[in-house]
Amino acid sequence: MAETTKVTMAQALNTALRDALREDDRVLVFGEDVGPLGGVFRITDGLTRDFGEERCFDTPLAEAGIVGLAVGMAMGGFRPVVEMQFDAFAYPAFEQIASHVAKLRNRTRGRLTLPMVIRVPYAGGIGGVEHHCDSSEAYYAHTPGLKVVTPATAEDAYWLLRDSIADPDPVVFLEPKKLYWSREDTDLGRRGALPFGRAAVRREGRDATVVAYGPSVPVALAAAEAAAAEGIELEVVDLRTIVPFDDETVTASVRRTGRCLVVQEAQGFAGVGAEIAARVQERCFHSLAAPVLRVAGFDIPYPPPKLEHAHLPGVDRVLDAVDRLQFGDEPDTRHLLKGAVA
Amino acid sequence: MSVKSLRQTVQGLLPSLTPVRFVAEDGTPVAKPPVGYSEPSEEALREAYRRMVLGRRFDTQATALTKQGRLAVYPSSRGQEACQIGAVLALRPDDWLFPTYRDSVALVTRGIDPVEVLTLLRGDWHCGYDPAATRVAPQCTPLATQVLHATGMAEAQRRKGEDGVAMALIGDGATSEGDFHEALNFAAVLRAPVVFFVQNNKYAISVPLARQTAAPALAYKGIGYGVRSEQVDGNDLVAVLAVLTDAVAHARAGHGPVLVEAHTYRMDAHTNADDATRYRDAEEVERWGAADPLSRLETHLRARGVLTDADTAAAREEAEALAADLRTRMNADTTADPMELFDHVYADPTPQLLEQRAQLAAELAETALTQED
């Protein structure tokens, strides 16, 4: 058995890029500051040095240009892996992503395909000033033709990125910034059992299912640890890929536990969590002992650094929601709080 | 950099002060032929004439088919044939073309089956031809977005060590879009072998050029990015072909991108759904009618003895045959398969798409049963 080592998610991503560059000449890495600097988060550290300017290079500072260039290069036989420097800086590229990246295969009946990856350092929890902490997954997940991936562990970061680069379709790869420096013992050379597109049950539990992805997975696991101390066993499902969405694993879990919480950092309204809650309720209605609850950020623009703690769903907000899962058969009365209108 | 070499660099990028022109509106050669460009061969000009006759006939037939309800919409390029044909004839078959919705005539000239060209506008699918086999990207609707793709494709060719060139076609309005500027900048920095060909037909739907830009000409947009630029009389096929051939050779030789602006005119409304009388007067249209690129080339070539009555008659006959074939095939009813809607979203449909596919199949089966009753 290969030995495990302490690896950060940032190192795992860097290793995935290196291995992909080494194994496939068609793979190119480009974007803003990804060259000699190694990216503002150092995810591309050393790639230009080790693989040359031809394989990893800086581009002019224009996100639509980066993605549009990648479209043409993918049409021309390359496999571009581009970096959007921050979540909210990717918005200029949205037209390219929504109108071309997502649609080219469909428009051309599969005659042109776009095997490309758009890496996005995303979400909050790092004390970033405005425009650096958006949770933008819903925009991409709502766009047919894109695959949307967000890892929660270093091992997943490595393998999901390798799979995304090898995928025949375009992938928006959302990297939770706050997990870049989290360490875990792992052997990146050993692929886990789960294929791309399947969710992982990170912790088993009989009382309620907590569905989470990306930055919210550690929060869900911490909440499960705390709940266990109170005698409530939470099962934690990590989606790994938002698109494709693994209905099977989620519904199997909720049918077992009879209760479901969905945790996301993003603002709740019209978010991915809302979609998951709807899907669970459509599929598991007769197994449910309580309404499916969402635990999310508030419907506000991302707050300034000193206030992000008040916005981000933490362990307490998850545990409050657990309390509202009607274990004691009391109705959920949160909507009767002073100030609530309905 | 010395002042002298700086001046040379700047002058090498700037377009000529007035549009390059070989043939005047009345078909006579201009008094002083443009410097730096070689006139296309007589053989090339005869072929261009034939293609322009075919292109014009295709365009008028497509407009007629739209009035008959066979096309959802048709954006005509009547009056822009020198640009449409010149662009395609300047390219090799292994070069890539990135057209817009108004460039159907260019696609027909490229040799794509006219029915496949019209698949998009007929409403059967978004693109009817095989872009990989024809090296013609799907006709692009979001303005200027495909200019970046052309740059990427050109860059891909360069990196693979191939000498292919990519040409992006856009209109005057699209030069206001950010993607146009990003593409020029990326192409210049990367020295990508791409030609940006702007057909300035004076209107972006209804908005005239004066409201689009304050630049002396759109060709001046190149210098800010270090892109070599030129402007040309877009209704003079001889000039368009000469300038674009030169631009393509420049890009192919590895000297970087070129921006070419052609001054032309959209004789018809934006599409059949548009009413051009609301924003331009008949006099203006009449004036441009006198500058018609097809009659200009015909007059010119006849005067040179390059074109005979037999040639023009043969071209017209061929054009009528093309139109008749197009009418016959476009008047046949087609059926689009609803189940195909799920086939090309991803390489493999997601579980959710498979569920929805089954749902639609059931809905269609139910409808079919109801109709039988």
Image (spheres, helix red, strand yellow):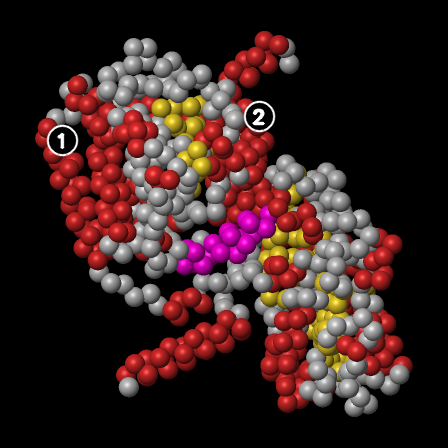
Q: Position of residue B366 (x, y in %)?
A: 37, 82
Residue B166's place in the image compared with A18, above or below, is above
* Whole-percent x, y for residue A302 in the image: 76, 56
Chain of the residue on which disc 1 is drawn:
B
Residue B311 occupies quadrant: top left
Q: In the rendered view, does B171 fall on the left or right side of A1?
A: left
Magenta-tinted stretch: A93-110
Chain ID at mark 2: B
Residue type (three-letter) at the residue carrying disc 1: Asp
Instruction: Give me the residue at 63% from left, 84% from top.
Output: A284
Task: Report which residue position mark 1 lands on.
Answer: B311
User: Vertical placement of B89 versus A323: above or below?
Assistant: above
Residue kind at label 2, given as amino acid type: Gly
Q: State whether residue B269 is above or below residue A204.
A: above
Would you say residue B288 sits in the magenta stretch? no
Disc count in the image? 2
